Image (tube, rainbow, N blue to C red):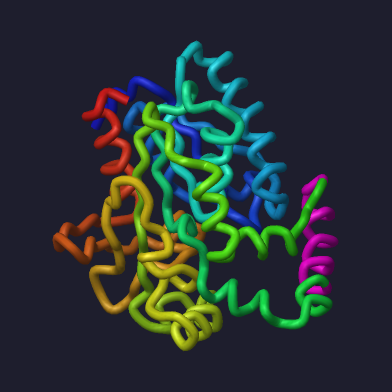
């Protein structure tokens, strides 16, 4: 398959990880490249604030445009990365350089569980954030601020964020949600899944479908078999070949890589 995209694709990672030798996006970039897609990475910090990472992403976008000669980029962003790109588009006024933003489990409406966690004693949450910052600094972050990241994932923060960062009419916004089917869908996500399930509802281990809907909602996806799709599976962190099923239509993809190829083919159909 040759996907004739008008603009290159920029993959923007979420919180807790960096783009490095071990690819955050697993097999997805190579699958897209085999279809003729020019793929780039955001390269922002793992646990920096939305504002800090947005500033880094503006420089990255400009460097891609200078390298390729393209006028815009198509962005696919995971989790908190989607918030950072929205800030780039709206607050940093770069809507003229972004053709589309497709978000994968981005907490556009905030996480109800994070609101509850932020009601724990502030010194405790600060301690957790501070200890995490040390490891992220060692891992390459220049200005990790995990406690601020916690705050920025809440519904309280996102209500203000959404008011201050309205959609740009020049940009095509799409969003996707995922669900684990049970605690054993991903053993690395079992504990957070159970916590979110008890406090809020069914999720991908972190976020509920209603918490991630924004723009054109592409649908809710899960596994076609016993196993669902976790927050890690949805960007191929686990490198497992899993059938993906859209719950609303019954559409099935043979693997997460095929799901991304479909997302990008839709951009090609829109001449983006």
Residue 133, given in percent of the width and then of the height, sits at 80, 60
Up the image or down, 235 lies above or below 174; here it is: below
Residue range highlighted in magenta:
127-142
Up the image or down, 17 lies above or below 191; here it is: above
Assign the magenta stretch its main secondary structure: helix
From the viewer's side, name the closer residue of 251 and 100.
100
Q: In screen coordinates, is 100 left or right of 134?
A: left
Residue at 29% x, 46% y is 216
From the viewer's side, name the closer residue of 69 and 52.
52
Q: In screen coordinates, is 119 left or right of 192?
A: right
Figure quadrant of the C terminus: top left
Is residue 188 something one can see in this rendering?
A: yes
The question of residue 139 being in magenta is answered with yes
Residue at 82% x, 53% y is 137
Res 200 → quadrant: bottom left
Is residue 238 something one can see in this rendering?
A: no
From the viewer's side, name the closer residue of 102 and 91.
91
Up the image or down, 146 lies above or below 225; here it is: above
């Amino acid at each position: 398959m040759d996907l004739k995209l008008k603009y290159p694709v920029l993959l923007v990672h979420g919180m807790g990880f960096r783009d490095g030798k071990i690819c955050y996006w697993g097999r997805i970039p190579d699958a897209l490249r085999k279809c003729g897609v020019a793929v780039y990475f955001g390269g922002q910090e793992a646990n920096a604030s939305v504002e800090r990472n947005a500033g880094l992403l503006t420089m990255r976008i400009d460097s891609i445009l200078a390298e390729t000669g393209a006028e815009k980029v198509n962005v696919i962003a995971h989790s908190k990365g989607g918030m950072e790109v929205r800030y780039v588009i709206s607050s940093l006024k770069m809507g003229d350089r972004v053709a589309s933003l497709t978000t994968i489990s981005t907490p556009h409406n905030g996480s109800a569980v994070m609101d509850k966690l932020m009601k724990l004693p502030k010194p405790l949450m600060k301690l957790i954030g501070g200890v995490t910052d040390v490891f992220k600094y060692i891992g390459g972050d220049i200005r990790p601020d995990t406690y601020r990241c916690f705050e920025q994932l809440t519904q309280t923060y996102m209500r203000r964020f959404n008011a201050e960062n309205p959609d740009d009419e020049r940009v095509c916004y799409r969003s996707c949600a995922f669900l684990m089917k049970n605690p054993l869908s991903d053993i690395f996500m079992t504990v957070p899944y159970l916590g979110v399930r008890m406090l809020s509802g069914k999720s991908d281990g972190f976020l509920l479908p209603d918490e991630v809907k924004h723009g054109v909602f592409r649908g809710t996806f899960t596994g076609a078999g016993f196993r669902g799709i976790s927050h890690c599976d949805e960007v191929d962190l686990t490198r497992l070949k899993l059938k993906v099923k859209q719950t609303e239509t019954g559409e099935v993809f043979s693997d997460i890589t095929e799901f991304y190829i479909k997302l990008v083919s839709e951009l090609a159909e829109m001449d983006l």
